[in-house]
Image (spheres, coloured by chain):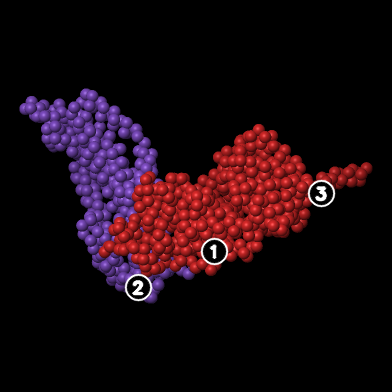
Chain colours: A purple, B red
Amino acid sequence: MNPQNSGRRRDPSLRSGFFTRFRLSWAIWFLVAVHAIVVLAGFIAPYSFETQEREHPYAPPTRLHFVDCSGKFHFRPFVYVTKTAANALDEYQQDCSQPAGIEFFPKGDRYTILGMFSSTRHLFGAQAPANLFLMGTDGYGRDQFSRLLYGGQVSLFAGFVAAAFSALTGLLLGGIAGMYGGRVDDVAMRFAEIFITIPWFYLLIAVRAFLPLQISPVTAFLLVVSVIGIVGWSRPARLVRGVILSARERNFVLAARGFGASNAYLLRRHLMPLTFRVLLTQMAVLIPQFILAEVILSFLGLGIGEPFPSWGNMLAQAQQYHVLVSYWWMLLPGLAPVPVFLAYHSLAETLQERIKSNI
Amino acid sequence: MRLRRSLLLCAAAFLPLLAGTQAIAQEDLLHTTSEPGIRGGRLVIAQRSEPRTFNPVVAVDQNAHGVNARLYADLIHINRATQKTEPALAKSWTVSRDGTQFTLKLRRGLRFSDGQPFDADDVLFSFKVYLDEQVHSPQRDLLLISGKPFKVEKLDAYTVRFIFPLPYAPAERVFDDVAILPRHLLEKHYQAGKIGQDWTLNTPPAQIAGLGAFRLKQVIPGDRIVLERNPYYWKIDAKGQRLPYLDELTFVVVPTQDAQVIRFEAGDSQIISGLSADNYAALEPEQKARHFKLYDAGPGLEYNFLMFNLNDDLEGRLPEIARKQKWFRDIRFRQAISAAIDRAGIVRLVYRNRAAALATHVSPGNKAWFNSGIPIPVRSLPHARELLKAAGFSWTADNTLIDSTGHPVEFSIVVSSSNAQRNQIATLVQADLKAIGIAAHVVPVEGRSASDRVLNTYDYEAVVMGLVSGDADPTPDMNVLISNGQTHLWHMGEKTPATPWEAELDQLMAKQLGTMNYQQRKKIYDRVQEILAQQLPMIYLASPNILVGAQENLGNFHPAIIEQYTFWNADELFWHPPAGK
């Protein structure tokens, strides 16, 4: 339905179609790119997330060179082998006598993509014995860049799964409440209000504390993520209920009912599809919220356990005074969620505008 | 007339001084050999939390010990720098030939901080209180010899005799930190059965008195505790000045180490102890600019270890753990784990080389008792694999270790989430064990939950934790090492030794307790360490160095490896005047 042809006045807050389309495509392409990079983390990252280079704790980002120590220019970028200074743990010196070129598709740690493809070829790396730490290393000598990419798998996946849980539960319960109304609606909505008041943070701490020790860190994390998602169903449910309440009185629904359509049929065929855009917008709002929840949980030590990285547990190391004052690159994981959140918010806002313009 | 008036004024001015000199002459004071200092000034010390009580009879927390050791004094004291005993309220003592009787001569003419005199009756009263079962003093356990209390007799107003049920080698050290109580203030409360509730943080400072270098001046709950110098303190320096030099000692509450570092750096507190190696490294470049000095006192008495759950009777309640105990009880499995762990890596990465790798619970910092003949285990994956193979383990194609029934070897390592260093150790151990095909899951849990699992519920598979010996002497380790010890951590509640080597440990520990000759005692304790290094009920990892700091103009600052590391000699600390004055 085109708003210009509908005869209704357009909301003055709505931006021009070009701007909206640009923002939408930018957000979508950016998110697709980020998710693709994160899925392909094993291939793009030069190291595994758990590889410890114990001779290189807290190494600063490796400097890429085009000009060598004697002032000669090279077209192919290279790095120098670094060594720790005598009697120092984290003071590194470049060895000008040992340059090492940047290689494409070198062999390295084994990785698996989406549980299907396994390989040892990486996109790039430095010739041995040099290391390529694009974002430095942590206290165990693990490459921060590689961990950031792998950490994205955990953080983005957590956000997506939790939002999907919320949206599906909200669709089901909100749909039933809106369709049947009356006591069913009352019970479902009071139930939703109870869930809104639950202090989810303390609930998560309790859930985490009661999990048996034998559960693997990944399983424990998935359980915590599911709890986040389940607790967050009430807002999407209220929205879905609102859409269904208004839609069930519309002519085409009444006509279908007149032809003998059952409630289940009406919900499935006519009403649920109307909630699609609302849910999509909700997903775009909820995903960054749940990514942030994961980051906070991991920051407090309640997220995924070692050695698995997430943006939150990588940032958690910056809580320590010495890390904060001495190793600036340890703060970089804190920047990673920012463009992702911006893109999701852009997407949500654009979708919201489109819904408004179609009303 | 004017001359007479001046003479009178002079006499009036000198009278208190003369009276003071006479008082000093009557008192049996202890002459210190430390550098004579300058009186005045205030020292601020940051503590993690405030003490729960000022009552030394019931105090259990470390913060209370820190404050109380300044308020009260003991009969014989352990010098934290030399780790040897030295006279305190007891001027001298003699030991009977059979080593069961200690006769202590007390200092004469001493006064409590409220001005009341001290004598043998205060000593008798104090030990009566500590040994009274109804009082539930945590000190009581330390005063029992083989489960029996010793007797205390008064020979005269300044002589007391302690009669031990058995010859007791560390008898002199038993008196350290056992505060002598003022009978005149506490006897009524004791008779009323209320001594345990006395001297709380709400008690008015004037109602608390001791023989320590300081007395209580002010308490601001949750914020600070201010102590002032005790004018009746019983130590003087080479120049005849009565100690302590400082006018005030203030304990402020700063809950985290990072916050303590920031306060110290800003000059809000003037000494800092228990620094992590990371914070030490972060503070090091600031020393000159901020006028403080950092000290590395070397390995302390703390030992960190990995321990498996060897408790009995878990089959019904915790079947999964009971199943895995078949691995844990196999000495070859424990030795393989020990061989796979990179202790040098732990020392380097966790402690920045400011720690010592360990083979047993005795660190090289404990010079009197360390067995240097036991080699520190070096990481050897081939040796670890050999041991595992000999124990019936094998590997799948993807390098997963499986036991003889085909179960993959996988266990969790519990660690206190609030201890960053132990979390790092657990993560390094996890990576080390992966190299021999073992999947270890690090499970950080809240500190109290971790100790509850180890001490009470036994709901853990392996744990990384640490203990700190209270003294260099082997005696405090009795509770951990003997099979019926209260903190026999790897197998709690063991009534009789479960294994021959534990039986030998029991015998050796009992024997060393009654051996008065140091050389013979050392030989026995060397054997104890050999057994522990072979049997590995705990896989000893590292002992961190004691890292502390103080303002550079703090005099007589001698950090020690026994608690309290920095202000154990608070009575001798003084401020050097600023340069140029």
Q: Amino acid at mark 1?
A: Arg
Q: In the image, is residue B576 above or below residue A206? A: below
* Nearer to me, B163 or A87: B163
Disc 3 is attached to a residue of which chain? Answer: B
Q: Which residue bears the numbered disc 3?
A: B26
x%, y% of residue B314?
39, 48
Q: Which residue is mark 2?
A: A99
Labelled disc at residue B183 = none
Cα distance, mark 2 to mark 3? Answer: 80 Å
Secondary element type, mark 3: helix
Q: Is residue B531 left or right of residue B29?
A: left
Badge 1 sits on which subunit?
B
Q: Residues within 10 Å of mark 1 (few under 14, many from 20)?
A: some
> Which residue lies under the disc numbered 1?
B527
In which quadrant of the rendered view does residue A123 lie? bottom left
- In the picture shown, does residue A343 fall above or below B33? above
Q: Nearer the viewer, residue A142 or A90?
A: A142
Quick one: which residue is furthest to the top in this view? A182
Front-most of residues B571 and B10 = B571
Can residue B41 be seen in this snapshot?
A: no
Residue at left offset 48%, top offset 69%:
A86
Kindly identify the residue that appears in the image at 71 percent across and 53 percent down. Answer: B102
Q: Secondary structure at mark 1?
A: helix
Q: Residue furthest left?
A: A259
User: Are tags 1 and 3 found on a single chain?
Assistant: yes
Check disc 2 and give the amino acid type: Pro
